[in-house]
Image (cartoon, rainbow, N blue to C red):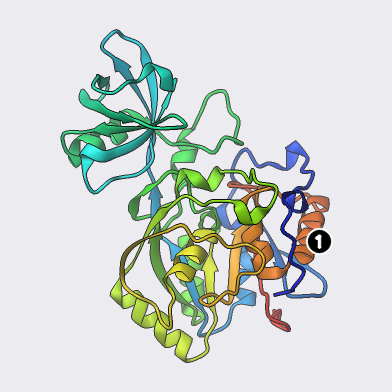
Amino acid sequence: MSADFKFEREDYLFELPPERIAQTPAARRDASKLLVAGAAGPLEHRTFAQIGGYLRRGDVLVINQTKVMNARCFAVKENGVKIEIFVLGIPADPAETQVLAKPAKRLKPDIDILFPHSGVRARVVAKHDQGRHTLAFESLDALSAVLAQDGELPLPPYIKREQGPSETDGDRYQTVFARELGAVAAPTAGLHFTEGLLAELAAAGVEILRVTHHVGIGTFKPLVAEDIRDHLMESESYFIDEGTVTRLDVAKSEGRRIIAVGTTSTRCLESNYDDGFHPGHFATDLYIYPGYSFRAIDALITNFHLPGSSLILLVSALMGHDRIMDIYREAIGRDYRFYSYGDAMLLLPRQGEIDA
């Protein structure tokens, strides 16, 4: 990692032509473009289907198996007023379900709301800042029914479609390895993988491990503070099972590369690592920005991020500010597509790692 640390928010802003923001997925998952960047030297341009050319036998690819909830729901008050309810996660206790409500001023404690398609009622328990509320559901089954029958897929705010999510989004805004329901946004680096590509990589000797890190609403939170060190991350939950921990520890001890698929897998692994990995359920608000020393991962597969976001700080921490800005300039100049449905990059921060 380069030592060109910059801590002013404006250093992480850049002009992105609106037409570069992908509104729909590529025709095939692995048909997306792939930019490959080492620590220095020329950038290489491929398709995602060719990523295997940059991976080695013994590499460990860590994927995030979280599944996006149908988090955007609509309910009605007893007087018939319609309220949008955005479920922020699946709680351990259904009586403490955290949501965003819109319009927030119409929702007050001690009233009931009805989700019409499922017929489920919930009570407003508390009102918090910034439109947040606590709802009490009778059971987790009741909450699940609301998500299944009253909810829709929450596409990111920069995907602007009058008609809302399509049937295609129901498939393409989930990874092929999505298993554990609980995210409000997709772990987008994983969207490029097909079952066939994963099988091809495994056959070539790449070890594929799964973690679960539920992407929270904070992933869209912009940097507001002028000094990036003053930014606060929202907590997100993650889980690593014992078998995965054992295999990660073995890979570390053998000096094999651990390659994170996405910034969520990165934060999961970096949060968890402390002279070894640890199994269990955890929460993390780890904030990775320039000056951070990576301990768990050796490389990263990720999409192209929003200017002025915590995610562009993470990749800048890995590669150095100036290198990342050069990468983004070239990507824009070569018509790469940005954000959730956009193209990908493989970041290899060690010298001499591009050997495709």
Residue highlighted by disc 1 = 326
- Label 1 is placed on what type of residue? Asp
How many marks on residues?
1
The answer to whether 248 appears left or right of 347 in the picture is: left
Residue 166 in the image: above or below residue 61: above
The answer to whether 89 appears left or right of 197 in the picture is: left
Image quarter where the N terminus lies is: bottom right
Categorize mark 1 by other alpha carbons within 10 Å: few (<14), some (14-19), many (20+): few
Residue in front for this viewpoint, 42 or 267:
267
Residue in front for this viewpoint, 210 or 29:
210
Q: Is residue 32 visible?
A: no
Judged from the image, the secondary structure of the residue bearing numbered disc 1 is helix
Percent x, y of residue 243: 31, 77
Looking at the image, the residue that sits furthest to the top is 79
Image quarter where the C terminus lies is: bottom right
Residue displayed at 27% across by 23% down: 117
Percent x, y of residue 167: 45, 35
